Image: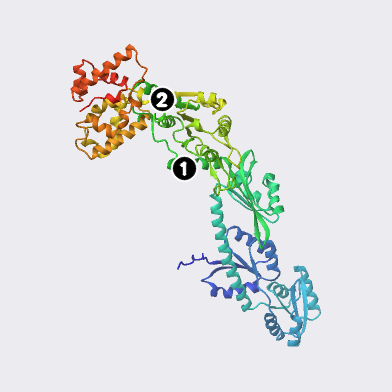
Amino acid sequence: MMKAPKQPHRRARIAAISYRGLTRLIGSLTPEYAERADITVIDKVFDEATEIARELVMRGQVDVILSAGANGAYLADTLGIPVVRVPVTGADVMRALLKARKMSDHIAVVTYQEPNSELEEIKDLVNLDIEQRTYTTIDDAKETFRELAHRGFRVIVGSSLITELAEREGLTGILVYSRNSVRSTMEDALEIAQIRYREEQRAERINAILSHLNEGVVAVDSDQKVLLINPAMETLAGVTAESAHGRRLEDLVPELAVGEVFRHGHAMLSKVEKINKRTVVTNRIPIRSDGNITGAVLTIQDAQAISRADRSIRSRNRRTKFVAKYEFRDIAGRSPAVLRARELCEQYAETDATVLITGETGTGKELFVQGIHNASRRRSAPFVAVNCGAIPDNLLESELFGYEEGAFTGSRRGGQTGLFELAHTGTICLDEIGEMPVSLQTRLLRVLQEKVVMPLGGDPVPIDVRVVAATNCDLKQAVEDGTFRRDLYYRLNILQVSLPPLRDRGDDVLLLSTKLLHDKLGSRAGERDITGLVERLAPHLLAHAWPGNVRELENVMERLAVLWEDSGNFLSSNVERQLRAIVPEFFTAAASSPPEDADSLKEFVERTEVQRIRNAVDECHGNISEAARKLQLSRTTLWRKLRRQHQDSSMPSTD
């Protein structure tokens, strides 16, 4: 079971302020409270008492003032801290009258402003001639004493002030207060002091919290007067806490008025306003007690702070999800076509202009897009990639632009942020842009032109996004066919780069094969002669058309790596027979045979030359270097000539 937090405790600080009669009585009781309170006894009244009390309050040396009678009433009206007044009970009056009767049969009871209602009943009990009089000022009291003395009264019962003044007029004063009444009042003062201390502690905690908030906060009472204002609100509103406290909020800063909250009784949230030439977001919330509005709280957030938080959140999302992994140095290849494409993309990375990357499927378009992002000034911002052809048409719009809660049936609670918003300050890759429905192309064009997205059911959201599009389609032809908007095409085709297919990259296929085999084999790569295997496969690798490009090559290399792990003498003999079972696509007519109508003299010579080369490779048991020496050709020239003709059905056996 959890223990309740320990309540704060502090010795109560009590100032007893009155005339000497009561202060002497209080002083006699102070030893009883020595462990619970620090009690200061002051023999002063009215203005002098008020001046001393104010000084104690200002120095923070008193929690409660203990007083009585007119002096207590005066202090209560003047000071801003609790004043506990010693009451006069019927028992106190009876005790004082019995004491007075021993001195005289004519007794006067003098009270401040109002007579004692119990005195008439007491008079009958004690069988005394008692006259009750009231006073408002000291002069009233003095005049009353002179009159009573003239009429033969010699004993006056009343407060310490009354007994003091009576004795100055030659009369006998009997103090009406008793020790029991003072004790009871002292207990009340101690309890009030502890309650006040706890409230002060709570207020200090709240103020400490509010003072550290970047959000401006101001609270008003039912009259819309300022009760509390934190430093952030002081800065935003251009006021100080001292000048604002107790004043109507609308008089201080009319733009911050909360009158509408009181009129309509409901909160006004997320309102964008201009306060002192600053754009802020405000929330006005009513405070209710027993069903009634007893005040209101206004909070203000600086729009720039919200923007910074937004960037921070988006940055956190970027770190966990929207990250570009590849850089230009990760792009393998030494062919002139690849080097030229990489050089162009490096230049494009220095700008924010839209880039259109074209190329067959599997040529590495997204790899180049990521390289552009990581080489740009936006490298530390999000990178968001979306395949426009992989998302159903009816979902693509909400994925790209987002939606608010309740925008359509089945929408996620709380709505969803669109991919364009998530890419704010970064890059968005629109892969397979040619597959985007025409109905969405119009919205995309507007986003590119205005740099603003409109979530479904929501308000416009400004964005700062660099767009890189990629496609394996012929967009020009799509424009002519009416499946792609002409204006969107020209908006996308600002900077263009075309990636070469693998069949046009020459020896890059061997370089990529070596790298992919090494990656697929992992820790066992050091146990295998990868270079030797690639050399044996070189004629087939160079001759194949690779319609799937690098993606197809990766597929083939993974297939070979899996089988190689299970066979120590993999492809060491009967290469062609094994390859026909493992990689049948190397031997399909579509990938290997030249067109039937290719019957020119030049083509005949080339086919004859290639056949001679393949025969030499077969005679050398697949040793490319030895075959090149026998034909008096360089290895590179031999591979290039093999590559020129795709006659896989008659590929030689390479051991």
Tell me the residue at 68%/46% (across/down). 252
Image x and y of residue 358, in percent: 45, 26
Query: Relative to the observer, which residue lies in front, 278 or 602?
Result: 602
Q: Which residue is mark 2?
A: 499
Q: Which residue is mark 1?
A: 317
Amino acid bearing label 2: Leu
Image x and y of residue 225, in percent: 68, 53
554, above or below 192, in the image: above
Helix, strand or loop for disc 2: loop
The answer to which quarter of the image holds residue 64 is: bottom right
Image x and y of residue 60, in percent: 57, 59
Bin the neighbour count of mark 2 within 10 Å (Cα to Cα): few under 14, some 14-19, many 20 and up. many
Tell me the residue at 70%/50% (across/down). 260
Tell me the residue at 21%/36% (across/down). 527
Query: Relative to the observer, which residue lies in front, 120 or 477?
Result: 477
- Which numbered disc, 2 or 1, marks the residue that appears first in the sequence? 1
Q: CA distance from mark 2 to mark 1?
A: 31 Å
570, above or below 208, in the image: above
Left or right relative to 121: residue 652 = left
The answer to which quarter of the image holds residue 484 is: top right
